[in-house]
Each structure stands twice: as C-alpha cells, then as structure tokens.
Amino acid sequence: MANFKKRFLDWFWGRLPEGCASVGGQAVIEGVMMQGPKTIAVAVRKENGKIVYRKKPAPNPGAKYPILRIPLVRGVVSFFMSLINGMKILTDSAEMAGQEAEEPSKFEKKIAEIFHVKPDDVMMAFAIVLAVALSILLFFALPTGIETLLKRVIKNRLAINLLGGLTRMAVFLLYVFLVSRLKEIRRVFMYHGAEHKSIFCFESGEELTVENARKFTRFHPRCGTSFLVLVMLISILMFVLFGSDSSNLFVRLGSRLALLPLVAGVSYEVLKGLARAGDTPIVRALRWPGLMVQRITTAEPDDSMLEVALVSLKAALDMPNPLPPEQSAEDEGEQTAESEPADGTVQADEHKDLAE
C-alpha cells in the first residue's frame, strides 16, 4: 500500500524514479536542441564543418509554482512552452549556423520602440502569432466548417465529429508530407532522426558514441509528432463529449478552441503513459499511429548529424568536453571563458568551449 501511494504521488507531481533522467529534444537548423534535467543545449554544424553549441538553464516553472506540475496542467504548460521556446531556438540555431538573420521591418522597429523591446522579439512574436493563426485555420476552422456543412445533411453527432476529426488528420498529414518535400526541411527531419537515435542510446545506458547511436531506431514513442497525432485522435472524443453541437460555425469553433487545453493535457498524459508502459499488443496498437507518422517527420541521419546530436545531448547532461575529441584537441589552448550573455545563454564557437 505504501509503495502504491509513493508511485501515485510521484506520478501526480511528475517526479521521476531515482537515478532516472528525463531527456527531450528538437531538430533545428543544421543541428539539434536537447533538454536535460537542468540544462538546455543547442548544437549546430557551421559551414566550415565545426560544431558549435550553446547552453542555458532549463526553465522549470513547476519548481516555483507546484500546481503547474499536476496532471493535465503540466501538459498544457509543456505545450505552450514548446511553442514559444521552439520558435526562438530555431532562430538561434540559424544564427549559430551562420545564416543571415532577416532584417526587422520599419513597422516591427516602430512596435519595438513603443513597447521598449528588441525588434527581434517583435519579429518572434509576429512569427508565433502567424503560426498559431495558420494552425487554427487549417486544423480547426477548416474541419469545423466542414462539420457545420455536414450537419445540414447528417443528424448523427458522432458521425459528424468523426468526419471532422478525419478531415483534421488528413489536413495534418498532407501538410507534413508537403513540407517534407522541401530540401531544407528534409535535412531538419534527418536531424530529427539523429535526435531520436541519440536519446535511445542514452536511455539504453550505452556510451554516447556515433557507433552506438547509429544502430538505434529513429522512431521514438515520446516524439512531438506522436503527441500531435494523439491530439488529433483525442480531440475527436473530447469534442463529442464536451464540444458544442451548434449549427453556428463560430460557436462550434469557439467551443473547440476552448477545449484545446484539455485536449493537450490529456494527450500529454497518454503520451507519457504509453512511453513508460510495457510492450503489450494494446500499447503497441496505441503507439502505432504516431510511429507511422514519424516515417514522414524523421529520416535516417548520417554520422555527421549523429555527432552533432550527441554534442547537444552531452552538453544538456552537463557532461564535460561535449565536443568531438578531434575538435577539442584542435581547439586546445584556445579556449577562453566569457561572461554569460543577458539571455542566460552560454556560447561556444569554433575557438571557444564555454561552460556555465
């Protein structure tokens, strides 16, 4: 009984078993972001072939506000933090890789001046708003509009919501497939595969080397792709149970948007539960849709990509000397420490290996 109580409380407060470290990641421009228990690291490969990385403390709002760690709430927090931080990390990775940043427009500079913020922050805010608006249009407004039209000829609520859900899934799969045809995105998907292989290598307890990581699968049950697939599937059930059945498009759409936090929270708990569940036929069946979509969103990486992913992972785990031995030896004697930038990021370039 005492053991059950401890396990329940550990689950409720999101505590990991002793000795277990949680690691997650994200593919970025020419590199990989990894988040360890205390540190976020981004590693990219520059055009000259050198790997560079940055580190900063991982945000932990649950430490200050324990309510953010409870079931359902933590899923919503994770969803929105991933959206906001993911966009900034993509921008940072492009800058680290040596790609020229887009110049803020006069309008964005004016907005920055009014609100006393950086023009780059205004650009980021606009990018996030645009991404959210596009997502709402494609994955909510369009399927809901189809549901509203179907309601004129179909009276069965379950059938209407099921068709709307299938439309949402079809739009999502088509969008991912079309994006995957872009050359630049294809490389990001290869780094996505490198991220998964590296995490599997760590979770297996093997030494973090390219040779060891190479043999693992690129499909991971905790992937964000699987999370989005679960959101699509669980939303069908949530909209049937709690969504409005109104014939008014805006009322119907509003109810679905209002339910999005609940859908995200439930999907997060299901994803985490499936990742830690045993390998039973039921668990495999529930994991299957997300793993199949990962065939689109991941690709087999080459060894140079695995090398970058492993540097990011080692840095996120606060391991010493995360850079490859040959690069560390080449840069030996040229390493200097700099003060931490205002954003809390620790930087390293081809002649610097900087630690917090």
Image (spheres, grey):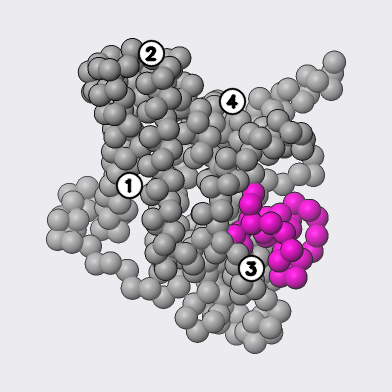
Count residues near mark 4 (Cα–Cα under 10 Å), then give few for <14, some for 14-19, many for 20+.
some
The answer for how far apart the CA atoms under marks 4 and 2 are is 33 Å
Q: How many marks are shown on the rendered structure?
A: 4
Mark 1 surroundings: few (<14), some (14-19) or many (≥20) residues within 10 A:
some
| Cα gap from disc 2 to disc 1, whole angstroms | 33 Å
Depth check: give the residue in front, 266 or 313: 266
Q: Which mark is residue 71?
A: 4
Q: Which residues are magenta?
A: 192-220
Mark 2 sits on what residue? 156
Q: Nearer the viewer, residue 229 or 314?
A: 229
**Residue at the spot of label 3:** 306
Of labels 3 and 2, earlier in sequence is 2
| Mark number displayed over residue 210 | none
Q: Position of residue 317 (x, y in %)?
A: 68, 57
**Alpha carbon separation for disc pair 3 and 2:** 50 Å
Q: Is residue 182 left or right of residue 42?
A: left
Q: Residue at x 41, y 40 (%)?
A: 170
Give me the C-alpha separation between circle 4 and circle 1.
Answer: 27 Å
Dot 1 corresponds to which residue? 131
Are the two marked residues, 4 and 1, in contact with CB atoms closer than 8 angstroms? no
Which quadrant of the figure contains the N terminus?
top right
Q: Where residue 132 sits in the image (x, y, percent)?
A: 33, 42
User: What amino acid type should be assigned to the residue bearing mark 2?
Assistant: Asn
**Element marked by disc 2:** loop
Look at the image and say whether residue 218 sits in the magenta stretch.
yes
Q: Which residue is pictured at 49% across the width and 40% down the height?
A: 228
**Residue 63 in picture, x, y percent from top left:** 59, 35
